[in-house]
Structure formats: C-alpha cells, structure tokens
Image (spheres, rainbow, N blue to C red):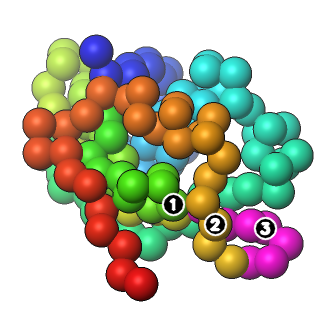
Amino acid sequence: MPYTIQFLTKWSDFDANRHMRHTAYNDYAAEARLRYFKEKGFDLENFQKLNLGPVLFSENTIFRKEIKIGADIKVKSFLAAISKNGERCKIYHQIFDENDNLSAEITVFLAWIDLTKRKLITPPTEVYTLLTDLTKTPNFEIIKLKK
C-alpha cells in the first residue's frame, strides 16, 4: 500500500477560478513527504540533528482534473527511483479529489545535502531505509550516478 494521507484544504489553496491553485498541489506533495518521515519516527528535529536536508532538482506536475473550492484531498506517495546509496531519489505523488478522481501527478527528483557544507551527501541508513520502504511505482528504477 502506498503511503496515503488526507488533507482538509484551506481557503488560501484556491484561486479566483474557484479551483485549487497550481502551486497548492506541490505544497501538499511536499507536506506528504515530510509527514511520511514524521509518522515513521524521523521528524524535522532528526533532520536538524544530522544537519541534513532534501534539495529538489526538479518537480514535474501533470494536472488531470480540477479540485473545486472546498473539496478535501488525498495524497498517495510512492518511490519511483533511487540511487544505490540513496543519495538521489524520485518520489511520485498522486493527488485525488474527495470523489477519488486522480487530479494531479507530481514527481520530484531530490538529493540530500549537508546543510553546513552545502554539499550533496549520502543519507544515513535510517533515511535510506525509510525511502526504500515506500511502495515502488510499477516503473521503479535504480538511478545510476555519474562518477
């Protein structure tokens, strides 16, 4: 089962066209990623202690069906790709409206950074394990890093 979380939307998530503004979809995907780690016992305090943070290389959003004002949503998260050491990964999110219609697909390509050195690093085993515990997409792949 993919990691799934429900959100109650807010007034500020919507635009003048009375549907969810485009950046709100990405905000909920980011929140789902953070909540996943927190629910697994690895919260922001853990990231701070390790001086570790995620850095996004890309974020691709495909809009499928509008979410109308006042509707609540569900976000499902999957692991789409990961490098052998976990340094880089792709997380795929599906966002559904309250009638279970697929409304958006978001794929983020990210890596881990040492927040002091500002350099990419291999995440600790605990982070790697949490990533690989996510349900994998059908087209899951291993990312080959260039030397």
Work out whether residue 71 can be spotted: no
Q: Quadrant of the C terminus?
A: bottom left
Q: Earlier in the sequence, mark 3 or mark 1?
A: 1
The structure residue drawn at horizontal position 85% and vertical position 72%, both measured from the top left corner, is: 116
Confirm or deny contact between disc 2 and disc 1 (CB under 8 A).
Answer: yes
Which region shows up in magenta?
Answer: 112-118
In the visual, does 50 lie left or right of 120? right
Mark 2 or mark 1: which comes first in sequence? 1
Q: Spatial distance from mark 2 to mark 1, Cα to Cα?
A: 6 Å
On the image, the x and y values in percent for residue 46 come to 80, 38
Q: Looking at the picture, which amino acid does disc 2 mark?
A: Ile
Q: How far across and how far down the image is residue 36, in percent?
A: 54, 28
Q: Is residue 90 visible?
A: yes
* Disc 1 target residue: 87
The image shows residue 62, relative to residue 119, as above or below, that is: above
Q: Amino acid at mark 3?
A: Leu
Q: Mark on residue 121?
A: 2
Foreground residue among 60 and 137: 137
Mark 3 vs mark 1: give the one in front.
1
